[in-house]
Image (cartoon, rainbow, N blue to C red):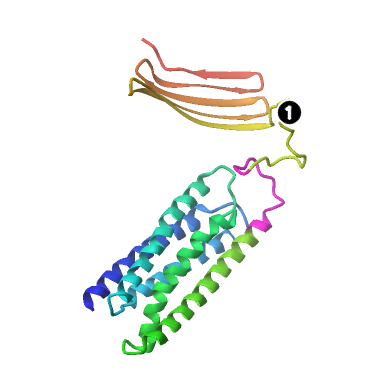
Amino acid sequence: MRVRAFELRLIAVALVVCWSIAAGLVLLAYRPGGPLDVLVGLLALVPIGIALAGVIWPPVARGDVAFPAIVWLGILALLCLVPSITGVVNQLLAFGSRTLLPSFEAAYPWLLALFATSLFSGFGIARRLEGGTAIRRRRLIAGTTIALSLTLLSGVAFGAVAVANEVAMRDRPVAASRFGPTTGSEQPPLCDEALSAGESARLNMHMSATVDLRPVGSIDLTGLRVGRDLRWLGDEATTSQLGRFGSARIGDRAWTIAPVTR
């Protein structure tokens, strides 16, 4: 039993680490300027406490079926958490991304990870409350009830505050968004109509080339345009050239940059 408790504690520690990373990202990086930014970050700390309960009271189970099921439950929570953390990193880094809950598709992995974590810790809490000799069915019901309660309380609290924070910012102007245009209420032109340039544009591009399956270099290009003002930078690393190119224009003034050639 001690070996099983140690293994389950390791899984619980991994859950604590993952939830701590997620909460740290929200608490430190989520600053869209809403009135509830800090509260959203503080509520993101709640799952850490839920996972920590699994470290203190691991859900040790007897039997050749119950113990592997508990282990896979913890692994399921980790499998949902790791890609979700990567997704929230990309979302926080995306230009103009202000919402943590853009859609149900983005939210349900977090809910699944939260429920799996709550269920993992809930069985440990139920074992602590009911005792290791209690009827398994009774502990199963108690653990599931605890898990549902923890998931609903923490999930609803975080979701409500996050949505309220976003609603408070909905009337603020947005410079750009990865979800579509942010200026004007008119519909985009039809496909058979003439194309026209927007008021602003942002470019991020990576190009690489190979010759006979051998890489010959790459170019990274970034640029920004607002009206007629623009700037762009390109870093070239190829077999024929190495350096940075770029230009900028503001009004009637312009600048260029190019690598020094000898």
The image shows residue 74, relative to residue 98, as above or below, that is: below
Instruction: Examine the image and state in which quarter residue 232 appears.
Output: top right
| Residue 50 seen in this snapshot | yes
Q: Indicate the position of residue 244 as horizontal and vertical percent values.
A: 44, 22
Mark 1 — residue?
192
Query: Seen from this angle, which residue lies furthest right?
Result: 186
| Residue 49 seen in this snapshot | no
Name the residue located 35 percent from the left edge and 71 percent from the top edge.
Answer: 69
Q: Nearer the viewer, residue 11 or 68?
A: 68
Tell whether position 15 is magenta: no
| 165 with respect to 155 (left or right) | right
Q: Secondary structure at mark 1?
A: loop
Indicate the quadrant containing the C terminus: top left, top right, bottom left or bottom right: top left
Magenta segment, prevailing SS (helix, strand or loop): loop
Tell whether position 170 is magenta: yes
| 106 with respect to 68 (left or right) | right
Number of marks drawn: 1
Residues rendered magenta in the picture: 166-179
Q: Could you tell me the amino acid type at mark 1?
A: Asp
| 173 with respect to 158 (left or right) | right
Q: Indicate the position of residue 30 as horizontal and vertical percent values.
A: 53, 54
Query: Seen from this angle, which residue lies furthest left?
Result: 3
The image shows residue 71, relative to residue 128, as above or below, that is: above
